[in-house]
Image: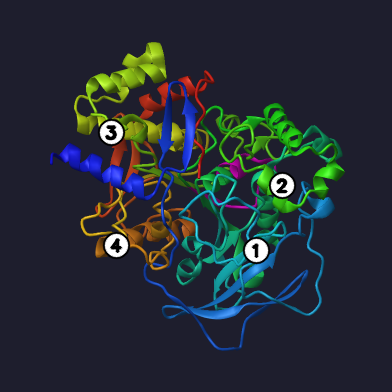
Amino acid sequence: MTPSESRSAAIRAWRTSIPPLVTFAIPALAVAIASLVSVFPRDAHSKTVSIARPQPRVELPAGRIEGSREQADSTQLDVFRGIPYAAAPVGALRWREPQPVERWAGVRDAKRFAPRCMQVALFRDMKFRSDTMSEDCLYLNVWTPARSPDEKLPVLVYFHGGSFSAGDSSEPRYDGASLAARGIVSVTVNYRLGVFGFLTLPQLAQESPHGASGNYGMLDQVAALQWVRENIARFGGDPQKVTIGGESSGAMSVNTHMASPLSRGLFARAIGESGSTFASGTLWSRQKAEKNGQAFVRRLGATSLVALRNVTALDLLRASRGGYKLPMFFWPVVDGYFLTEQPATTFRNGAQAQVPLLVGTNSHEADQAWLEQNRELTPALWRASLTALFRERADEALALYPGVDANEIAHASTTLAGDMALSHGVWRWMDTHRTASHAPVYFYLYTHARPAKRNAPPGAPAEPGAMHASEIEYMLGNLDREPSYAWTADDREVSRLFSGYAVQFVKHGNPNGATLPDWPAVREDQGGLLRQVIDTRTETQIDRSAARHAFLESEFAKGRFTPGAAR
């Protein structure tokens, strides 16, 4: 079998075992985005065990909570799960800004994860430790070293991915024990999803004191950040040293918070993994989102807000099961309140949060399944595909994504699919922030492929590259929370490096540390931009993709393409 045939067989085997879950439509072709991954962590070096009483208690403005004393390796942690940061958004509070929590009597148990937000099962890589889902889901979790609350440790607030339609703060891959064992107060957050978090209607705007609707899920995140600002010192965290982070749609959240006037001053650093709002067309205008919302209401048959709020949560969820099929698609919108303009415009004007940024993508954010389809990868097929995509600009595209043999075409098509799905928007986020801010930007390309699963048949191929979302458990130090993979010494070394960079960045706004390869901030060098390639051999390289991204942005701006849906 030739190397090309072997690689194609590996991709087909991987694609068969985990079917693509996200697609976006483009003329004459459908680019299948490989948004797979199984990442349901446990720290690469840390297993958490509970310790007998006394259990930790914290006095909050709304009442007292009791968590659990646990241990990660040799470090004792205080863990508080299911802390309410806003009132339940049910009944009359459905599709309203989050409201303050009412005070409770006695001691509230904070040892179990609260229900996840209402959602459809879209992604096979998601595993939940929450018992159920509910519209009453505005809760967060805190992991902190069992030390004096006066220490004022740096804080990471992490927003889960899931295309603003799925996901949960209880997922093991986001577990905060590993980072807490290294001196960071770690927070994960639930926020309203799908139709519950992003329905946009003129009627809702009319009743809002701000004249806006939609973005309820983003306002939930703002409320969580405000809760952290007001309360994290009670858990030993420093409210002046908060980093916000997230992957895919979680990174899109970070991107929008950097642009939103409502989030200003609530964080000091930002981490974005494989997600951005910067590709033209990613975020809808208010008018387009309202049209989508009105189509949903007609489909539901409700005639008033009272009627809409009387529909059960399950019936609303069932009615919105269109998933990625327009028009039943709900996510952030330029509403005039949370977002006053497209985030890219805010950044270009230098009006974004001027904070250090660590941002990057993976090498295989999407694959060439859309091109291959059991056909031989020939130069003629590649040119025909680019012509179908870019018409009269096919020659320009071919110069940017060259392919003269099967191996080169496979690489070029994977790069193009990844660029169109996610990488283009992330690159523009990085480049715009570095040119419109004095704060440092640290740019990465993650290339390490996960090993085969433990239960895979003999000879089963590993993943063909660093797939979308596959970096999460490495960066957050949670390999051991995903036992289905046969982790190797190389995997643990990559996790040591990547999580080490993350820890240093959260603590200091700079990823560098004594035991880590040097990672310079982005700057122009030798006709390109410096970026850190993270793998078993981690090193600084020159990124020379600016021409690709200028070309793609001009194509996105024509409105012919829809940027890929971020996980």
- Residue at left offset 56%, top offset 62%: 155
Please report the bounds of the magenta region as a residue range. Answer: 255-272
Task: Report the Cα–Cα distance between label 4 and label 2.
Answer: 45 Å
Query: Residue 115: which disc?
Result: 1
Q: Which residue does the numbered mark 4 point to in the structure image?
A: 493
**Contact (Cβ within 8 Å) of mark 3 with mark 1:** no
- Residue at left offset 31%, top offset 23%: 400
Residue type at mark 4 is Glu
Is label 3 in a helix, a strand or a loop? loop
Nearest-to-viewer mark from 4 and 3:
3
Residue nearer the viewer, 113 or 310: 310
Query: Which numbered disc flags the more N-terminal residue, 4 or 1?
Result: 1
Residue nearer the viewer, 246 or 121: 121
270 shown above or below 479:
above
Residue type at mark 1 is Pro
Task: Report the Cα–Cα distance between label 4 and label 3.
Answer: 36 Å
Q: Which residue does the numbered mark 2 point to in the structure image?
A: 316
Task: Report the Cα–Cα distance between label 3 and label 2.
Answer: 40 Å
